Image (cartoon, helix red, strand yellow):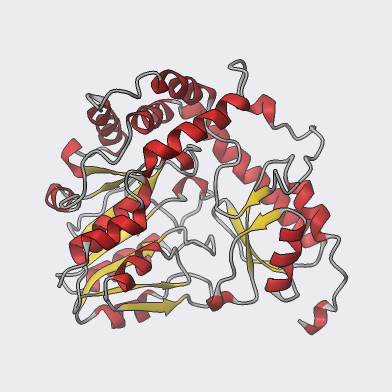
């Protein structure tokens, strides 16, 4: 039988967007005067904030710690007053802007309640018992969880020695009885990229009935290089490719729960079948539309992340630790001691970081915080007793 729609919807939490929007907006109102820019709230010269049980430092979900721009905050405040109305033109406006941004037709855009709903749509559309999912290990786990809950086989192929997708091992796994291949680029949790040319060659060798979902949630954080190029910035002429993006990262709208997919009109029509067409709230759609308009804030976000990532690596190197070179807004660090001990120590000091990944069991994942937050992380880190790094 096909993937259960009920199981998919339960895991995604469709409809939670409206509930999440108002608490998130209250937080924005408390943290904003409505004047100036977000930069004024988090400056490098501000004193390091204290981490407390009531107000821990959150470095665990790869969120944008700076939040959305002031322009988006203004739209959010205005939009709450219209929360008693159902969507009217908000979806069409947002879809139109995305179509222009990516040089595609509006009928190629599918909106979702976060990119999680997009993954659920893909699972429901392309997976069923006898049609397996092929993905990397480790990678973003939601799609695999959707598949497993529905009784679909999941084949997880370890990353190669460069922490890239091992595409040729994935190709061997995908040659028979495969419904969907999932590629997260940059990958979560490693922050690494798989070269575009390799992905193109891989897709060209796949069986003709296999669909490929390329998750570009962290696209904006990639430093310019010759290996990486988005499949939306330069289109790839293969109708089996779906590209997903989110407003949770560079745009700072994780709590608003809004993402989207770009695909052929045929796939874009197929994806949302069985899903409600109103899971994106009016508030979220308006905020996302305003975020697309604020291109200067996107540029600022890219620069901030580049600077914060470099400073984090400076601190890693100063402590003679090891880290995987990241192209995202988080870093995988080998703490040179048992990760479980590090996670628990930081938690006791009110610093929350990512979970342990069994496939990379010597590493921890740390999301980048603001210049006011990261000193609290390193202060807690330095409270750990010294270890013999040579023995690790």
Instruction: Please tell me in which quadrant of the rendered image residue 76 appears.
Output: top left
Question: In the image shown, does 370 or 123 lie closer to the viewer?
Answer: 123
**Place of residue 289 in the rendered image (x, y in percent of width and height, measured from the top left):** 36, 28
Relative height, residue 349 to residue 250 (above, below): below
Left or right of 49? Residue 35 is: left
Left or right of 34? Residue 122 is: left
Q: Residue furthest left?
A: 266
Relative height, residue 330 to residue 92 (above, below): below
Relative height, residue 172 to residue 15 (above, below): below
Which residue is located at x 30 percent, y 83 percent?
Answer: 172
Question: In the image shown, does 13 or 209 lie closer to the viewer?
Answer: 13
Which residue is located at x 26 percent, y 75 percent?
Answer: 152
Q: Residue furthest top?
A: 35
Instruction: Please tell me in which quadrant of the rendered image residue 341 appears.
Output: bottom right
Quadrant that contains the C terminus:
bottom right
Which residue is located at x 25 percent, y 54 percent?
Answer: 236
Left or right of 114? Residue 62 is: right
**Place of residue 200 in the rendered image (x, y in percent of width and height, measured from the top left):** 30, 64
Question: In the image shown, does 227 or 1 lie closer to the viewer?
Answer: 1
Which residue is located at x 31 percent, y 38 percent?
Answer: 280
**Place of residue 10 in the rendered image (x, y in percent of width and height, measured from the top left):** 32, 57
Left or right of 278? Residue 68 is: right
**Place of residue 130 in the rendered image (x, y in percent of width and height, measured from the top left):** 18, 79
């Amino acid at each position: 039988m096909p993937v259960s729609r009920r199981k998919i919807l339960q895991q995604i939490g469709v409809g939670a967007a409206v509930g999440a929007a108002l608490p998130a907006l209250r937080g924005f109102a408390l943290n904003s005067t409505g004047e100036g820019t977000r930069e004024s709230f988090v400056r490098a010269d501000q004193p390091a904030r204290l981490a407390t049980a009531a107000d821990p430092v959150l470095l665990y979900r790869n969120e944008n710690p700076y939040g959305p721009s002031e322009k988006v905050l203004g739209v959010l405040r205005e939009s709450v007053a219209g929360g008693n109305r159902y969507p009217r033109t908000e979806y069409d406006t947002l879809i139109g802007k995305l179509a222009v941004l990516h040089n595609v037709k509006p009928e190629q855009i599918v909106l979702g309640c976060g990119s999680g709903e997009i993954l659920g749509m893909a699972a429901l559309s392309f997976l069923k018992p006898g049609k397996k999912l092929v993905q990397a290990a480790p990678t973003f786990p939601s799609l695999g969880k959707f598949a497993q809950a529905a009784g679909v086989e999941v084949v997880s192929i370890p990353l190669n020695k460069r922490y890239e997708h091992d595409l040729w091992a994935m190709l061997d796994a995908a040659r028979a009885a495969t419904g969907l291949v999932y590629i997260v680029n940059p990958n979560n949790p490693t922050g690494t990229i798989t070269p575009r040319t390799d992905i193109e060659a891989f897709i060209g060798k796949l069986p003709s009935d296999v669909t490929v979902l390329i998750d570009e949630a962290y696209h904006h954080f990639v430093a310019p290089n010759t290996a990486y190029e988005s499949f939306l910035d330069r289109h790839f002429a293969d109708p089996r490719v779906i590209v997903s993006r989110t407003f949770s990262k560079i745009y700072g709208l994780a709590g608003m729960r809004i993402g989207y997919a770009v695909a052929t009109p045929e796939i874009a029509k197929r994806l949302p079948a069985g899903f409600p067409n109103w899971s994106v709230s009016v508030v979220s759609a308006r905020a996302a539309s305003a975020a697309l308009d604020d291109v200067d804030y996107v540029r600022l976000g890219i620069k901030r992340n580049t600077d914060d990532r470099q400073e984090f690596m400076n601190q890693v190197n100063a402590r003679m630790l090891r880290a995987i070179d990241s192209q995202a807004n988080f870093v995988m660090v080998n703490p040179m001691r048992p990760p479980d001990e590090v996670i628990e120590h930081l938690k006791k000091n009110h610093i929350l970081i990512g979970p342990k990944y069994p496939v990379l069991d010597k590493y921890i994942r740390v999301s980048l915080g603001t210049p006011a937050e990261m000193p609290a992380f390193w202060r807690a880190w330095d409270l750990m007793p010294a270890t013999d790094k040579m023995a690790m």
